[in-house]
Amino acid sequence: MNLAKTYTPNEFEPNIYAMWESAGVFKPTGQGTPYSIVMPPPNANGNLHVGHALGSAIQDILVRYHRMKGDDAVYIPGADHAGFETWVVYERELDKQGKSRFDYSRDELYAQVWDFVDKKRGDMELQLRALGVGADWDDLVFTLDQKVIDTVYGTFEKMWSDGLIYRGERIVNFCPKHQTSFADIEVEYETEKSKLWKIAYPLLNHIGEIVVATTRPETMLGDTAIAVNPNDARYAKLIGTKALLPLVNREIPIVADEYVDMNYGTGAVKITPAHDPNDFEIGQRHDLPTIQIVDINGTMMNVPDEFVGLSVDESRQRVLEALEKEEFLRGEESIEHSVGHCYKCGTVIQPMVKEQWFVRMQPLAEKAIAAIEQGEVAFTPANKSKVLVAYLRELKDWNISRQIPWGIPIPAFQNIDDPTDWIFDTRVDQQEIVVNGTTYKREEDTLDTWFSSGQWPYITTDYLSGGQLAKFYPNQVMETAGDILFAWVARMIMLGVYRTGQVPFRHVYLHGLVLDEHGQKMSKSKGNVINPMEAISQYGSDALRMGIIASRSAAQPQAFNAGKVVAARNFCNKLWNIARFVEAQVGQARSVQLPEPQSMADHWVVRQLGRAGTLIEQQIAEYRFAEAFETLYHVVWDDVADWYIEASKVETHTDMLVWVLDTCLRLAHPFAPFVTETIWQALSWHDDLVAQASYPSVCAYNELQAAEFSRLKKLVAEARYVMSELPGNDRYTLLYGDDSLIAENTELVRRLARLKEVKSVDTARGLRLAASGRDAWLDVSEEVLYEHQTNLEKRLVEARAQAAKLQGRLDNERYVSQAPAHLVEESRQQLKSTQGLIERLVNELDVIG
RNA sequence: GGGUCUUUAGCUCAGUCGGCUAGAGCGCACGAUUCACAUUCGUGAGGUCACAGGUUCGAAUCCUGUAAGACCCACCA
């Protein structure tokens, strides 16, 4: 025997992977329809999490399946430099060494992080291999590879000349801890309890005061106006006049702006253009000065001496105290409002005015919306298309500047003599360049990671340069996590359409968040993180793959279920043992041919495997992976192992056994690549690898023969059931009369039903197996027969209820006239067979009674 | 404020176009077991499909509303 007695995945999985790689099975064959999936590049700064196990299992199933179907399939792997994410990790490392980013230049830091990531990246790639990911490693793209940077710069230049990229002074989301700005999408809002303070500003041209309401009193130090609604009668005559800003004693105008809600607060709003997005816009409309009062460290500047250098929170307290003392406070009110936080460190985001690079989004979004609405990209689940379009419609300009050293440098230079003169240039390794006698200095910011990863499909396939993989663009499927629909999928569609004129992929499949076993979100701080590598060492890679896709539907946040992983491990063990049985029967070296079914069990198993194969194809085509796996699980376990293998112990047809196992291995391969390959290799029936084999061939069978076996199964099941209801554990004899199905299969029936004996009799006696409708009895004693009477009565009641229900349905004229004819016919047949059952049960009770 | 999703067995979840007695895994109960596998085999119990209406010959499935929960978006100072 080549197959060991026990199934021990950890002993063979690494070798199997090495075998695939050295045989080059993951390379596109150049034959067939191109089928491509590009891996969402995992962050190169750490370990894979369980979400990767789910995503990569689905991606790998699709690619392996399509390869077996004869497509020219490729799975392009990647690694993400993950700009800000990695920077956060590295900054922590610096912190541990007692260093800070300010101890080094941008170029030095870039080099350090490069080394750091280079070390980490290998781990991630090994982990993907452990998951069985059949990716074409030679085509791996790292998001800082030269070709990525070249393409990204090409896009930047095109956008620049198309007027889609501009540099502007805007309110940006700024994290004072990480000292960088963010895109809107990177800010996490949380609802917090706070207070709405009312502050009196003395009027200059009238007697009295105007009271404003604010949640951020400290920002009053930067106020440059008060705004009221133009239709607000209360303030009408104040419009155009001035008020005095308390504590600062600055004269500020009272302006009218539609933005102000008359019904909220006092109807008068203090305007701080430098630190609030709405105030900034009002400031633009009314030509107000912008005074920055919070610096990049989150401390106060440009304010009266007593507040300079205070943090925002301290400043709030001191301002309130001062206002109280000078009697400007006019009350406070408890409210709830949402506050933006840095999604990495939780620090409160400070909106502040900065000059940054922005992408004009609406021209890009419009084209993406059109493509989505025309169905050029399909979504699973389908509703996500609507959700994405709604997002795109509201999309505002995108801040792509990041004040961190780790990332792709922004390819722009500024005239040292004219700050408004910017030029595009890719010589970002030089701090200064001279163009036509003018000196320009480098922009020190880097690009938002999503700006480059948003171009992933056409970069990885070398589509723009027309490389070897160009035919794989657009990709067939983008499989990724549902929570990056906006951040990534949206940008890939927009940039793909912009740069290539076509959508980057035909289908988007989104998987949901994997929660812990109790349905809670996993997090390091809760300590409930499931490590996929531990699951692999415990149960095997195949088991994790199947266990994690089982019972899971698209984009649904669902708990990790270790029970499913165990069940999948047991399934692998079942496959293993089917193979061991077959090996023992037929040996290792032999050829696999399309067999000719002989016994009715042969015909039946051919039918079952054929049906399952077709069903799995449909289910994969509809992205129903959990159901496809369930189909596989049941055909292998229930049909093949529990019935066909058992039947073959009575009558062995070796060619058929070989074909059945071969078919199971092919069907199972996309789901359980390691164990199927291990068996395939151990048996030596083929010279190739199952990873390169084709999807199972269909084998002809006779439906009548297959149906005969189904009838036999029914008889066996009834015999088992009736015997389990009988007292004691005796083995019974089955008696049969004029019944050729039993007569021709006495040994099969005896063995499957665990009977003592199966023999023919002239006169009926004992307990009739009524349900299966065969001419068969269990040879039981009078007492047992009598005890069994109640069971028969119970079944008779059930059968009569069923018959009444069917009769009622058929008596309903509207059912008969309006329901589809085949359903009506089906009901008639059911009624007939139920009536037959009732008759047999009544006879049986007569005999006993 | 707007939107998306979820609610089915003790637990975690499937259930496609509305159509057989609503399924799976785990768990539970009873039984088996030298002959591929205790990572096994057989049998069974367990469900008011969240709730209330409606449409239909027929609803877990479609419509309306209610409740509970999850998530996303949004500038309400």
Image (spheres, rainbow, N blue to C red):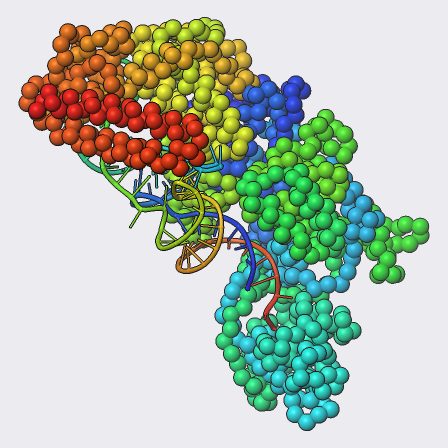
Q: Which residue ends up furthest to the right in the rendered image?
A: A437
Residue sitting nearer the eye, A797 or A376: A797
- Residue A524, percent from left and from top: 46, 50
Q: Is residue A706 above or below residue A7?
A: above
Q: Look at 76% across and 30% down and name the residue there.
A: A466
Residue A14 lies left or right of residue A286; in this view the side is left
Task: Report whether residue A496 is seen.
Answer: yes
Q: Which residue ends up furthest to the left in the rendered image?
A: A783
Dividing the picture into quadrants, the one containing residue A222 is bottom right
Instruction: Point out the image quarter for the N terminus of chain A.
Output: top left
Q: Look at 57% across and 45% down and name the residue there.
A: A384
Residue sitting nearer the eye, A148 or A230: A230
Residue sitting nearer the eye, A294 or A631: A631
Instruction: Point out the image quarter for the C terminus of chain A.
Output: top left
- Residue A715, percent from left and from top: 26, 18
- Residue A795, percent from left and from top: 20, 30
Q: Look at 46% across and 18% down and name the residue there.
A: A610
Q: Look at 12% across and 30% down and name the residue there.
A: A790
